[in-house]
Amino acid sequence: MEKAKIYLGCDHGGYVLKTQLVDFLTGQGYAVEDFGCHSEDIVRYPHYAARVAKAVRSQPGARGILLCSTGIGMSIIANKYRGIRAALCSTSYQARMTASHNNSNVLCLGGRCIGIFEAQDMLHAWLTTPYEGGRHDISLGLIESAENVNFSGKDWEGEENDKNSPGLV
Ligand code: RB5
């Protein structure tokens, strides 16, 4: 699997873990670009999510990693950008599954929730697990439909009955 270009962003709560992950990824041979912040001084996380989301979207195959104290705020703002599938994960199982099922292009982590060793395992799982495609394309297509409708100022309604997978959960 070709190594993706990785854009990173954080706020003060994610700063320490982000610096450790930059070192880890660089050591693994990934090309990384760090969009800040660059200290533990208090900043507002949406600014950094915006930089990463736009960079990921502008380059096919690129990935983003966003960290705040919990990862929650970063995931909320990142998912407001068209084409961004941001996954908030706290285990390597989730990181592997979101790569194979959601084809997520941004990983959100809680800098005050997980340690460096778990984070390293999560990054390894997320960056090396291929997207499975197949039936997952149906759901990703629906998410894209929702995005198109919602970005036009309306609300995507979904469908009352799921015709694609009757009887399946
Ligand atoms: C900042 O105090 C904190 O709210 C932020 O790091 C993040 O966890 C928000 O979701």
Image (cartoon, rainbow, N blue to C red):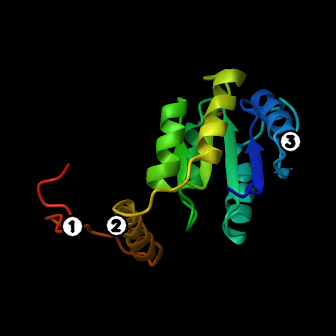
Q: Mark 2 points at which residue?
A: 138
Where's residue 85, x and y in %? 53, 57
Mark seen at residue 164: 1
How would you rate the neighbour count of disc 2 (Cα within 10 Å): few for under 14, some for 14-19, many for 20 or more? few
Query: In the rendered image, which quarter contains the N terminus?
Result: bottom right
Disc with the residue nearer the chain's start (2 vs 1): 2
Amino acid type, label 2? Ile
Where's residue 138, x and y in %? 34, 66
Image position of 40 with respect to 3: above or below: above
Determine whether label 2 and label 1 are within 8 Å by CB: yes
Residue in the image at 63% along x and 46% along y? 128
Q: Please, what secondary structure does the residue beneath circle 2 have?
A: helix
Mark seen at residue 26: 3
Image position of 84 with respect to 41: above or below: below
Residue in the image at 55% along x and 68% along y? 82
In the displayed structure image, the side of residue 64 where residue 15 appears, left or right: right
Amino acid type, label 1? Asn
How would you rate the neighbour count of disc 3 (Cα within 10 Å): few for under 14, some for 14-19, many for 20 or more? few
Where's residue 110, x and y in %? 62, 31
Residue in the image at 69% along x and 46% along y? 65
Task: Examine the rendering and report whether any part of residue 9 can be seen.
Answer: yes
Where's residue 64, x and y in %? 69, 52
Q: Quadrant of residue 90?
A: top right
